[in-house]
Amino acid sequence: MVHGDNALRFALNALRYAKNMNLQGIVSVSGKPGLWKALAQNKTGFILESLDAQKTKLVVNLSTAKLAALDEITIFGWDEDLRLTDVFAKMKAAASVPDAKADGNTLRRFFREVAPEHDEEKVYASDMKKIINWFNILKTLPLFNEEQVPTEAPMAEVPVIATPVVDEVAEMPTKPAAKKAKAKAADTSAEAEKPAKAAPKKKKAE
């Protein structure tokens, strides 16, 4: 365990290292050893490249393969889960990192230092070995020591359909209304021109 001033220095170094770590596009593939970098995306999945010296290319189908982005992985914690990137930052600040093949007690002591709030009942020795193996792959890469630049997700292109602007005023039936009014006026004048009916004649008195 780290105590006193050493603990404060350790925490400050971890914060500094966390800012200088770019794990965007780095993934773990279920059933495949090591780590991979996403190069491109196709209709069904991703084209990956291994981070080892062989630079092996791999095409994965998302319907059959399980991918986990390292910058989104978390570790079981007592109160809340711990971000893997935060654990990596503390591992960078640590004086030494044990070998992944070390015994379980050694690994546990180390994780109590770099992830003191991890749930020891749920984080197994195999998990700690995997994390240390990942750290050993990443620690010599430039991306592990460069600042992550936030990028905005590209907006999906939505086709724009041109629609005519409708002028409601222009479509109002003004002319027919005028004709109707004219016809009505004509009817009124015609009624005015009709001769008045003669008043009924009075019967002569007998």
Image (cartoon, helix red, strand yellow):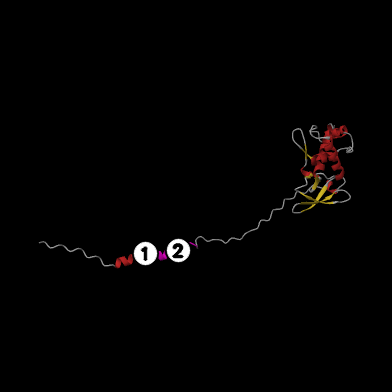
Q: Predominant secondary structure in magenta?
A: helix
Give the image location of residue 68, x and y in percent: 78, 44
Q: Specify the quadrant of the image occupied by residue 165.
A: bottom right
Judged from the image, the secondary structure of the residue bearing numbered disc 1 is helix
Give the image location of residue 167, x and y in percent: 52, 61
Q: Is residue 140 magenta?
A: no
119 left or right, relative to 163? right
Query: Looking at the rendered structure, which numbered label has been put on residue 174?
Result: 2
Give the image location of residue 134, x and y in percent: 84, 43
Which is nearer the N-term, disc 1 or disc 2? 2
Residue at figure coordinates x 87%, y 32% from the top left: 105
Q: Is residue 119 above or below residue 146?
A: above
Judged from the image, the secondary structure of the residue bearing numbered disc 2 is helix
Q: Specify the quadrant of the image occupied by residue 201.
A: bottom left
Q: Nearer the viewer, residue 93 or 121?
A: 121
The residue stretch that appears in magenta: 171-185
78 left or right, relative to 199? right
Quadrant holding the N terminus: top right
> Of the residues shown, which amino acid type is indicated by label 2?
Thr
* Residue found at the far front of this picture: 64
Q: Is residue 177 magenta?
A: yes
Q: Is residue 102 above or below residue 186?
A: above
Q: Nearer the viewer, residue 117 or 75?
A: 75
Badge 1 crowding class, 10 Å Cα cut-off, few under 14, some 14 to 19, many 20 or more, is few
Q: Is residue 99 above or below residue 177?
A: above
Query: Looking at the rendered structure, which numbered label has been put on residue 184?
Result: 1
Residue at figure coordinates x 81%, y 49% from the top left: 37
Q: Specify the quadrant of the image occupied by residue 128.
A: top right
